[in-house]
Amino acid sequence: MAAYIIADIDVSDPTLYQEYRTLSTSAVAQYGGEFLVRGGSTTVLEGEWTPGRVVVLRFDSLAAARRFWESPEYEAARSVRLKAARGQFILVEGV
């Protein structure tokens, strides 16, 4: 069953965040993931959520998503992201 990593990110350093995008794009591809949403405009339809930059990744399984999340390649990307942005991330099983 597919799994999705969903992120809501507030970027504080766009220049450094571009480095994160480069590193994370490579890691996502290496671990079989695909970007379904990567930024773009958002419209709140209900509730109090005020999203920043929304990203949705798809993986073939929860195990595949975890391999990506825990990989040394993504750890390198994450260390850059932590200097450039704050985010909230969830892993959810889907269809």
Image (cartoon, grey):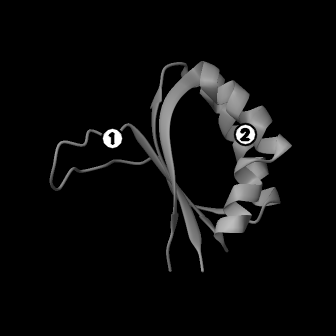
| Kind of residue at disc 2 | Thr
Q: Residues within 10 Å of mark 1 (few under 14, many from 20)?
A: some
Residue 37 location, x and y as percent?
49, 57
- Using residue 7 as the reference point, say whether residue 28 is left or right of it: right
What is the CA distance from the residue labelled 1 to the residue labelled 2? Answer: 22 Å
Which residue is rendered at x = 31% and y = 49% of the image? Answer: 42
Q: Which mark is residue 90?
A: none
13 is higher (above) or lower (below) than 30: above
- Using residue 17 as the reference point, say whether residue 90 is left or right of it: left
Q: Is residue 28 visible?
A: no
Residue 66 location, x and y as percent?
70, 57
Which residue is rendered at x = 24% and y = 51% of the image? Answer: 43
Q: Secondary structure at mark 1?
A: loop
Report which quarter residue 84 is drawn in: top right
- Using residue 67 as the reference point, say whether residue 88 is left or right of it: left
Which residue is rendered at x = 58% and y = 68% of the image? Answer: 3
Q: Secondary structure at mark 2?
A: helix
Nearer to the camera, 4 or 16? 4
Q: Where's the N terminus, which quadrant?
A: bottom right
Residue 7 location, x and y as percent?
49, 46
Report the mark closest to the observer, 1 or 2: 1
Which residue is rendered at x = 49% and y = 74% of the image? Answer: 94
Residue identified by numbered label 2: 22
| Kind of residue at disc 1 | Pro
Residue 23 location, x and y as percent?
76, 39
Q: Is residue 5 visible?
A: yes
Earlier-in-chain disc, 1 versus 2: 2
Total numbered labels placed on residues in the image: 2
Q: Residues within 10 Å of mark 2 (few under 14, many from 20)?
A: few
65 is higher (above) or lower (below) than 78: below
Nearer to the camera, 55 or 62? 62
Residue identified by numbered label 1: 51
